[in-house]
Image (cartoon, rainbow, N blue to C red):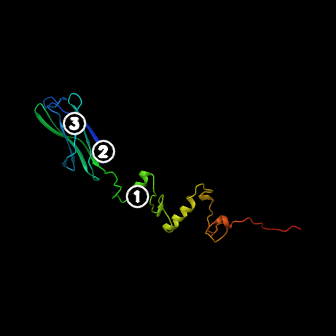
Amino acid sequence: MIVQSAQVITADFVTSSPATGAATIADSLPVGTLIINGTDNAASVTVTSKTGGKYNAAVTLPTLANGDTVQLRVAATVATVAGIGVVWQATGSPQVDLIDDPNATAVAAVKTGLGTLPADLVSIGGTILAGTGALISAAFSKFFNKATPTGTINSLPDAVPGAGPGVSTATNVASVVTPQLVVVERVA
């Protein structure tokens, strides 16, 4: 189980009679302790009695580092015999730190729905892209930055601009395209 900082953890456990092993109410309310990487933590563990030796322990996890081992240990006394044991454990995975995380800008933009996500234009879907990042970025902007697109990628000819018919080298294609009448054969 992976847990995160500030997550509330609950664990049920049972106290048993040392003589019979049957569920038995403890002499007093059991005490819970949160342990992080083998060290007792000061987080407050709340233990509540359910019925007949059944209990619940709850704790809000403090700030965790990636890979921290987190345990919940309970100590109880039944019929004057003290017992102790771990009733829950997991590995910690911290929440993303939007200040110090190297991907903080991307994470913040995704979480808020605002801003621009940074992109590394080296490959898309595993396909290595030719050209510089600036050229690829310009091509994406020119093709996809349209409120109402008038074509698809399939409507672009597979040709080099300026090398033949079909691809204009002009900045504004609409301004250079004019209707022309071409006379192919003259009939008398």
Classify mark 1: residues with Cα within 10 Å, few (<14), some (14-19) or many (20+): some
Count of numbered circles on the image? 3
Q: Earlier in the sequence, mark 2 or mark 3?
A: 2
Percent x, y for residue 91? Answer: 28, 48
Cα separation, mark 2 vs mark 3, equals 17 Å
Image quarter (top left, top right, bottom left or bottom right) of the N terminus: top left
**Residue found at x 28% / y 49%:** 92
Left or right: where 45 falls relative to 185: left
- Does 21 appear above or below 169? above
Corner quadrant of residue 20: top left
Classify mark 2: residues with Cα within 10 Å, few (<14), some (14-19) or many (20+): few
Q: Earlier in the sequence, mark 1 or mark 2?
A: 2
- Does 112 appear above or below 168? above
- Does 57 appear above or below 94? above
Cα separation, mark 3 vs mark 1, equals 41 Å
Image quarter (top left, top right, bottom left or bottom right) of the C terminus: bottom right
Q: Amino acid at mark 1?
A: Thr
Percent x, y for residue 154? Answer: 61, 58
Residue highlighted by disc 3: 47
Left or right: where 140 falls relative to 109: right
Q: Amino acid at mark 3?
A: Val
**Residue found at x 85% / y 68%:** 186
Classify mark 3: residues with Cα within 10 Å, few (<14), some (14-19) or many (20+): some
Percent x, y for residue 78? Answer: 14, 32
Residue highlighted by disc 1: 105
Q: Amino acid at mark 2?
A: Gln
Percent x, y for residue 139? Answer: 55, 64
Residue highlighted by disc 2: 7
**Residue found at x 29% / y 42%:** 8
Cα separation, mark 1 vs mark 2, equals 24 Å
Q: Foreground residue, 17 or 70?
A: 70
